Amino acid sequence: MPKNKAINLLPQEEFEVSTLGRVLKWAMGTFRIIVIVTEMVVMGAFLSRFWLDAQNSDLNDSIKIKSAQITAQSSIEQSFRNVQTKLNIFGEITPKILPSQRVENIVSKIPPDITLSGISVSDISTQIKGVSNSEAGIVQFVANLQADTSFKSVDLGSISSSDTDPTQTIFSVNISY
């Protein structure tokens, strides 16, 4: 019986010495490395799929929970927006008094013997500091301010005698709107 013998048609020694042989040997080695690296990348992608699936599932659950929360609070949000709209409409309808108009209103109520030394105007209150030659003038000024219905309250803050001129009285008045 004949024995199976392997026949190599490419001589090893002469083939590896030739240029074509060296190029083919390099190409076979390089392609083998490329195939191994590609297989490693594919296996890494396959294994990372499990982690990505778990992350995707967690994100989907989070989206469902947050959607349910938003849906549950939609009626509160709607009523809040309705109240905000009503407040905006009320704010546009309600006349706004400018600080200059408030000062003009206060100045029109000053008796002749009072001199103002300072006035501070804010959205909710005004503070007036002044000097008067008589206490009757201060009483008249406070009475004039209290007669105005646009003021919520008028309070006499402080009264003291002037250090430089004993005939003058220093006072302060607080007005709230």
Image (cartoon, rainbow, N blue to C red):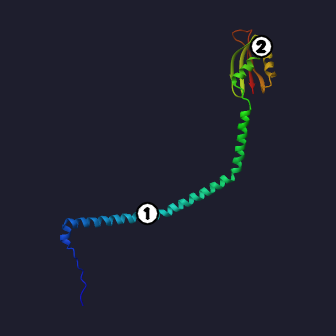
Q: Residue furthest bottom?
A: 1
Q: Height in image: 152 above or below 132?
A: below
Tell me how far mark 2 sits from mark 1, CA to CA.
92 Å
Does residue 114 appear to the left or right of 57 in the view shown?
right
Identify the residue at image location x=54%, y=59%. Answer: 56
Q: Which residue is mark 1?
A: 44
Look at the numbered disc 2 and give the secondary structure of its residue.
loop
At a point 58% along the width and 59% down the height, the residue shown is: 60
Kindly indicate the quadrant of the structure image that contains residue 58. bottom right
Say if 89 sits above or below 102 in the image: below
Does residue 127 appear in the picture of this structure? no
Look at label 2 and name its amino acid: Pro
Label 2, residues with CA under 10 Å away: few <14, some 14-19, many ≥20: some
Given the image, on which type of amino acid does mark 1 rest? Gly
* Left/right of residue 162 with respect to residue 146 in the rendered view: left
Q: In which quadrant of the rendered image does the N terminus lie?
A: bottom left
Q: Residue at x 69, y 47 (%)?
A: 77
Image quarter for residue 11? bottom left
Give me the residue at 80% from left, 16% from top: 140
Residue 85: x %, y % from top left? 71, 40
Residue 47 visible in image: yes
Which image quarter holds the C terminus? Answer: top right
Q: Report the residue marked by disc 2.
A: 111
